Image (tube, rainbow, N blue to C red):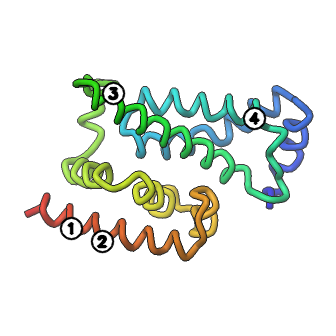
C-alpha cells in the first residue's frame, strides 16, 4: 500500500536513517499540521502535536508495516490520537478552572478566518471529537472514506454513519448561528 516514491525512503527509515526521517517529515508535516490545526484551532498546539506525532513515529517506526497501511494514514492516526489526548487534557483543565484562550497564537489569527469560516469552525468544534475528525479528514483533508475509516479505526459503513450524523448536527448548528 506504500506509494512507490516513498518505498525507498521508508526502507531507509526502517533501517534507522535520520536523513530518510527528515525527508518524510519534510514531505508530510505540513499536511499533518493542517489537519491538527483544524482540529485544535491553535497554531501553538498544532506545532507541538506535529512534533510529537513525528517523535512517536520515529520511536515506533519498527511497528510500521508499509505493506499494510499507507504512510499518510499511519501519521494521521498518530496525530488523531494525540488530538484526542489534547482534548481530554483540555477538558480536565476546564473542569479545574478557567483557562486562557489559546487563540492568541498570533495577532493575525483572527484576520486569517473570514466571519463565515469562523462560524463554521465554531460549529465544527461543537461536534463530538469523532464526528469532527471524520468531517475534517473527508472534507478538509480530502482523504478517501476508506483511508479515513482506517485512520479512525472504523468500518467504512460506520464512518459513513458518523459523517451523516456529523453533517446533520452541523446543519442544525449552522442554521441557528446564521439566522
Residue 35: x and y in percent read 49, 46
Which is more N-terminal, label 4 or label 1? 4
| Residue where numbered disc 1 is placed | 172
| Residue where numbered disc 4 is placed | 23
Describe the element under mark 1 as helix, strand or loop.
Answer: helix
| Residue where numbered disc 3 is placed | 93
Residue 52: x and y in percent read 60, 29
Marks 1 and 3, how far apart at CA: 29 Å
Quadrant of residue 59 within the rendered picture: top right
Above or below 25: residue 148: below
Please indicate whether residue 54 sits to the left or right of residue 5 in the image.
left
Which is more N-terminal, label 3 or label 4? 4
Marks 4 and 2, how far apart at CA: 40 Å
Discs 1/3, front? 3
Q: Does the CB distance between marks 1 and 4 fall below 8 Å?
A: no
Discs 4/2, front? 2
| Residue where numbered disc 2 is placed | 168
Marks 1 and 4, how far apart at CA: 43 Å
Q: Quadrant of the C terminus?
A: bottom left
Describe the element under mark 4 as helix, strand or loop.
Answer: helix
Few, some or many residues within 10 Å of mark 4 (<14, 14–19, 20+): some
Amino acid at each position: 500500500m506504500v506509494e512507490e516514491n516513498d518505498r525507498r525512503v521508508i526502507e531507509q527509515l526502517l533501517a534507522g536513517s535520520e536523513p530518510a526521517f527528515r525527508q518524510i517529515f519534510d514531505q508530510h508535516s505540513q499536511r499533518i499540521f493542517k489537519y491538527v490545526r483544524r482540529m485544535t484551532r491553535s497554531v501553538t498546539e498544532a506545532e507541538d502535536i506535529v512534533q510529537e506525532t513525528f517523535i512517536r513515529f520515529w520511536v515506533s517506526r519498527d511497528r510500521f508495516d508499509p505493506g499494510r497501511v499507507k504512510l499518510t494514514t499511519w501519521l494521521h492516526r498518530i496525530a488523531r490520537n494525540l488530538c484526542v489526548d489534547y482534548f481530554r487534557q483540555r477538558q480536565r483543565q476546564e473542569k479545574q478552572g478557567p483557562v486562557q484562550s489559546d487563540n492568541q497564537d498570533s495577532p493575525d489569527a483572527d484576520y486569517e478566518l473570514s466571519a463565515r469560516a469562523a462560524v463554521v469552525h465554531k460549529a465544527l468544534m461543537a461536534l463530538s471529537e469523532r464526528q469532527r475528525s471524520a468531517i475534517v479528514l473527508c472534507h478538509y483533508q480530502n482523504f478517501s472514506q476508506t483511508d479515513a475509516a482506517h485512520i479512525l479505526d472504523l468500518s467504512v459503513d460506520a464512518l459513513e454513519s458518523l459523517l451523516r450524523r456529523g453533517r446533520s448536527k452541523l446543519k442544525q448548528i449552522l442554521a441557528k448561528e446564521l439566522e
